[in-house]
Image (cartoon, rainbow, N blue to C red):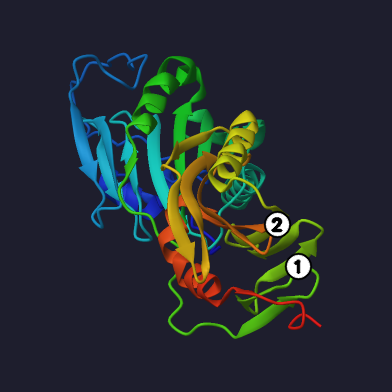
C-alpha cells in the first residue's frame, strides 16, 4: 500500500482561505480565514457552533466520480492534488476530509485498524500535544494542539471499498467537539462510493502446475503462487492475499441435493448465508450433479461469494467449491474456470 500525504495540504488550504504561511498549523487543520480590517467594526461574538441554523445542504461529486457526499452549502471545498477533498467550516474551526489509497488485499478488521493507526502516526504523531484518545475497529480519535485554535480533536475512520481504502477525517476545536461531532458524523454517513477496483485481471497467467492427490484420486491445475493443502476430507488451494479458494472434498455417496442443503444449513448456524440460488441440476466435466450459489458474511465482515457443486461417482460424493470476496468474484473466475475445467477423477491404476 502506498504511503499517503496528510489529508489537508496546508499551502492549498491557506491559498483558498486567504490565509498566509504563518497561519499554517502542523496538524493540517486549516486556520480561520482572515477578515479584511474594517476601521469602525464592532467586535462580534464567536458563534458557539460551526454549523449555523438554516444552512442548506449541497452535494459534492468527486471529479473522477469515485464518490459523492452531502455537506453544508456555506462550507468551502478544497480539492487535494493526490485525490480527495477537504470541506472547511467558514469560521475555520472545523474541517472534514476524504482521502483514499489503493490496496491489492482484502483487509481483515485487524489489518484495517493497523492501516488506520499507521496513517495517524505517520501524519500526526509528531504534532504538539498529540495524544491518542481511543482506537476501535479502524476508527482512531486523537487530540493535538493548534497554535491559533488551541486544542483540537480529530477522528480518522478507515473503511475499505473493494480495493480502495478511504480515510475520512473530522477535525473540530475541542470546546465545540461535543455539539459538532454528531453533525460531521452525519456528513460521513452521506459518503457514497461509486467506484471500486477489483483484483487486477491477469493478462499473462502465472505458471500452472498439475496437482495430483494419490490419496483422493483427483488431479487439477493450480497457479504456482497458490498454496495447496490436503487432509483426510479432501484438498484445498488458496491464494492467501486475495481470499480466493478452490476445494474438493469427499463423502460417502448419498442424496446430492439433500447433502448440499445440509451444508447450507450448517453454515447458517454460524455465519448465516445472505442470499442463495435454488439447488439445480448441473454437470462438471463428466460428473453429473447439482449446484448452488450463495453469499454469506464471513467472520472478518467480508461478504463471500460461493459456487458449490456436488456429484456422485464410483460410490463417492465429490463436493467442489469455489469462493472469493463478492466484489472480486467476477475477476476470480479467470483463475477458477481453468481449475474447474482441469479436474480429473483418477482410476486406481492412474494414482499409483
**Residue farthest to the front, as pictured:** 315
Q: Can I make out residue 272 in this image? A: yes
Residue at 33% from the left image edge and 53% from the top image edge = 195
Left of 319 or right of it: where is 279? left
Label 1 SS: loop
Label 2 SS: strand
Residue 276 location in percent, x, y? 44, 40
Q: Residues within 10 Å of mark 1 (few under 14, many from 20)?
A: many
Residue 294 location in percent, x, y? 47, 44
Residue 293 location in percent, x, y? 46, 48
Q: Decide which of 325, 93 is in the foreground and name it.
A: 325
Q: Residues within 10 Å of mark 2 (few under 14, many from 20)?
A: some
Q: Quadrant of the N terminus?
A: bottom right
Q: Quadrant of the C terminus?
A: bottom right
Q: Can I make out residue 6 in this image? A: no
What's the CA distance linking mark 1 and mark 2?
Answer: 8 Å
Q: Is residue 181 above or below residue 325?
A: above
Residue at 35% from the left image edge and 51% from the top image edge = 84
Q: Are marks 1 and 2 in contact (CB under 8 Å)?
A: yes
Q: Quadrant of residue 236?
A: bottom right
Q: Decide which of 195, 31 is in the foreground and name it.
A: 195
Q: Quadrant of residue 228?
A: bottom right
User: Residue 333 shows which numbered tag?
Assistant: none
Q: Is residue 270 above or below residue 217?
A: above
In this figure, which residue is indicated by the disc labeled 1? Answer: 216
Between discs 1 and 2, the one toward the N terminus: 1
In this figure, which residue is indicated by the disc labeled 2? Answer: 250
Residue at 34% from the left image edge and 17% from the top image edge = 46
Number of marks = 2
Amino acid at each position: 500500500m502506498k504511503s499517503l500525504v496528510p489529508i489537508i495540504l496546508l499551502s492549498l488550504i491557506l491559498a483558498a482561505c486567504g490565509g498566509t504561511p504563518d497561519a499554517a498549523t502542523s496538524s493540517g487543520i486549516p486556520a480561520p480565514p482572515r477578515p479584511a480590517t474594517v476601521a469602525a467594526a464592532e467586535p462580534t461574538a464567536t458563534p458557539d457552533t460551526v454549523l449555523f441554523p438554516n444552512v442548506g445542504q449541497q452535494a459534492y461529486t468527486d471529479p473522477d466520480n469515485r464518490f459523492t457526499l452531502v455537506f453544508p452549502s456555506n462550507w468551502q471545498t478544497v480539492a487535494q492534488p493526490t485525490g480527495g477533498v477537504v470541506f472547511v467550516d467558514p469560521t475555520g474551526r472545523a474541517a472534514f476530509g476524504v482521502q483514499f489509497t489503493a490496496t491489492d488485499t482484502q483487509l481483515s478488521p485487524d489489518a484495517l485498524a493497523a492501516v488506520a493507526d499507521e496513517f495517524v502516526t505517520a501524519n500526526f504523531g509528531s504534532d504538539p500535544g498529540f495524544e491518542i484518545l481511543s482506537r476501535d475497529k479502524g476508527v482512531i480519535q486523537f487530540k493535538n494542539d493548534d497554535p491559533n485554535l488551541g486544542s483540537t480533536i480529530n477522528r480518522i475512520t478507515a473503511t475499505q471499498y473493494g480495493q480502495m481504502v478511504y480515510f475520512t477525517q473530522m477535525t473540530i476545536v475541542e470546546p465545540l467537539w461535543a455539539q459538532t461531532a454528531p453533525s460531521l458524523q452525519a456528513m460521513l454517513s452521506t459518503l457514497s462510493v461509486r467506484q471500486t477496483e477489483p483484483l487486477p485481471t491477469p493478462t499473462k497467467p502465472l505458471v500452472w502446475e498439475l496437482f495430483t492427490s494419490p490419496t483422493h484420486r483427483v488431479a487439477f491445475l493450480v497457479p504456482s503462487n497458490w498454496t495447496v493443502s490436503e487432509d483426510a476430507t479432501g484438498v484445498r488451494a488458496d491464494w492467501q492475499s486475495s481470499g480466493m479458494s478452490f476445494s474438493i472434498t469427499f463423502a460417502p455417496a448419498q442424496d446430492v441435493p439433500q447433502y448440499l442443503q445440509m451444508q447450507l444449513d450448517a453454515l447458517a448456524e454460524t455465519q448465516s448465508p445472505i442470499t442463495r440460488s435454488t439447488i439445480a441440476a448441473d454437470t462438471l466435466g463428466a460428473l453429473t450433479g447439482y449446484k448452488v450459489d450463495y453469499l454469506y458474511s464471513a467472520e472478518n465482515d467480508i461478504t463471500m461469494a460461493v459456487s458449490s457443486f456436488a456429484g456422485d461417482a464410483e460410490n463417492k460424493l465429490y463436493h467442489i467449491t469455489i469462493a472469493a470476496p463478492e466484489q472480486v468474484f467476477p475477476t476470480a473466475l479467470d483463475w477458477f474456470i481453468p481449475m474447474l475445467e482441469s479436474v480429473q477423477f483418477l482410476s486406481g491404476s492412474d494414482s499409483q
